[in-house]
Structures are given as structure tokens and as C-alpha cells.
Image (cartoon, rainbow, N blue to C red):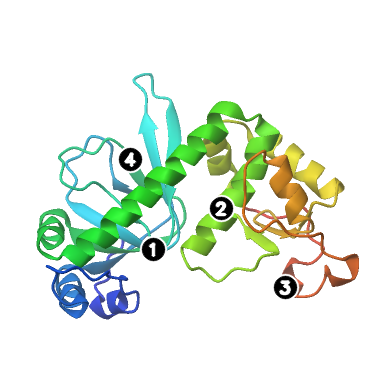
Amino acid sequence: MPKIMVDSDAIADQPLQLHSHPRGVRPDDAQEQLKRIGHIRQYDSGITIVAEGDEPSIIGRVASGVVRITQTLDDGRQQIVGLAMPGEYFGHFFRSGSAFMYEAATDVAACVFPQKPFEALLASHHGLEHTVMMGALRDLELSREWIMVLGCQNTFERVVSFMLHIHKRMRMAGLPTHDRFIEFPIGRRDIAGYLGTTVETISRHVQALARQRIIRILDNSHFEICNLGRLQSLSKQHWNAMAKSIPTSELDSGVPQALKGKSWSQSGLA
């Protein structure tokens, strides 16, 4: 069972950006009601938060860590169909029975709300309803982008697209990041499952990118981008803000000392 810690003040530290609505209540009112019904819960890596087929009783908003969303076939095969990053919701709204399994891919802290009271808030607070709907539409857009990756791209292009996709998601979530660095928020086995390939194939493609000096490997989860424009080109997708190569003299600036000189195989990230 997950370790549970109630801390309503922590929810206030991550306020939702509620949009104004002519029939809505003041955003502060919605925030206060969210604080009253919500709790912070801590889930250890590997814990199932909501099992596939269960009657969902909670709606969660990731505060830290990553939630893995999977679906299982009748023969037992599983596919990772999505990831919930910090600031994003997981669970189902206005329906019974969970079509997916939600698991903690890393240690996760989440703002958790009971489903029925949260749905009642959505119905009465139109600013909150608008915010959640916009998040759902964004998730739908990201899912459609990822269908294109899995359906049309070879494994090399998928690895490149995953790097750029994760970098984009972390920036969208408002996480502290830098244009030159990519951080994998999940382990290699989960990445392989998400991309529909193997750990060995991912390692081979990452090493190829490093040999071409398109990226530099800092450890198994951190990479420095040496040529963002080339990386974007290799993904065969359209990306904004194409960047120039970084001069060799600048490559060491800003790299954490603990990460310098490590290879792809030196980290213990599974």
C-alpha cells in the first residue's frame, strides 16, 4: 500500500491557473475547496495507484515524479500508452471502471482528490472546469503526436523523438530545465516499452547520436544537446525554435560536475 501523508498546504503551493468565466466563482474559492477535499499522497516506485478494471475513486494531479499509464491485452501483454508528468492529471472523469492501469514509474507525490467531490467542483466552478478541459485537450494532442511516432517512425527516429518529446513535456510542465539538457524521467525498460523496442536498441541509437556529436551522454538519464537543429531534423517532425550547434568551447559550461565523464552504461538506472 502507498505511504500516505496528508498535507493540504502542499496543494496550495501548486495552485491551478484558473481562467475567468462569466458564470464562474472566484478562483480563490475553487482553490480553497480543492484544498479541503485534496491530500498529498506519496507512492513508491512500482506501486499501482489505480488498477485496470477497478472502479476509480480518485483523481490525481502529479506533483513530482512520473505516473505510467498502461493497458493489458487478454494474453497478458502490456503496453505503456502514456505518461503523466508533474502538473498533469491522471484517472478518469465522469465514468465508471478504469480502462488503464496507473502506476508510479518513479517515486511519485500527487495531489489526490476523491472522484465524486472533484466532479461536483468541475460542474459548479467553471474556471476549474475550463482548466481541466484544456489539459485534457493538450493530452489528446500529445497522444495524437505519439501515435504518429509509433505508427510511422523507425526505432532510431522514435528514440530521437522521445528525447525531444520529453524535453517539450518538461518545459510544458514548468519544470526547471535548460535548452541544452535532456533528462529521462523514467528508466530504460519503461522507455523501451513506451517506444515498442528493446533496451539494447535504445542504447545503440543513443551511442550513435553521441558518436555524431549530436548529443553528449552525461549518464543514463541526462544528456547534453550539442546540435538541437540536427536532432530535430533526424526526428522527421516539425519543431519550433530550431537551434544552432553549440561551440565545443561551451560544452562544459553548466554541466554538473557529478555528471561529467560518465558513459551510457555507467549509471544504474534500469
Residue that label 1 marks: 87
Give the label, 2 or 3, closer to the camera: 2
Residue at the spot 14% in from the left edge and 66% down from the top edge: 125
Instruction: Using a 10 Å C-alpha cutoff, classify the residue at mark 1 as few (fewer than 14 neighbours), some (14 to 19) or many (20 or more).
Output: many
Of label 2 and label 3, which has the lower sequence position? 2
Question: Could you tell me if residue 98 is visible in this image?
Answer: yes
Residue farthest to the top, as pictured: 75
Residue that label 3 marks: 256
| Callout 2–callout 3 Cβ contact below 8 Å | no
Of label 4 and label 3, which has the lower sequence position? 4
Q: Residue 166 shows which numbered tag?
A: 2
How many angstroms separate mark 2 from mark 3 (CA)? 20 Å
Task: Work out whether residue 237 or residue 112 is closer to the camera in this orientation and state it.
Answer: 237
| Secondary element type, mark 4 | strand
- Left or right of residue 59: residue 103: right
Question: Could you tell me if residue 2 is visible in this image?
Answer: no
Looking at the rendered image, the quarter that the N terminus falls into is bottom left
How many angstroms separate mark 1 from mark 4 (CA)? 19 Å
Instruction: Using a 10 Å C-alpha cutoff, classify the residue at mark 2 as few (fewer than 14 neighbours), some (14 to 19) or many (20 or more).
Output: some
Could you say which quadrant of the image residue 116 lies in?
bottom left
How many angstroms separate mark 1 from mark 2 (CA)? 14 Å
Of label 4 and label 2, which has the lower sequence position? 4
How many angstroms separate mark 3 from mark 1 (CA)? 26 Å
Residue that label 4 marks: 101
Give the label, 1 or 4, closer to the camera: 1
Task: Work out whether residue 9 or residue 187 is closer to the camera in this orientation and state it.
Answer: 9
Amino acid at dot 4: Met
Amino acid at dot 1: Gly
Amino acid at dot 2: Ile
- Left or right of residue 70: residue 115: left
| Callout 1–callout 2 Cβ contact below 8 Å | no
Relative image position of residue 82 (x, y in whole percent): 43, 43
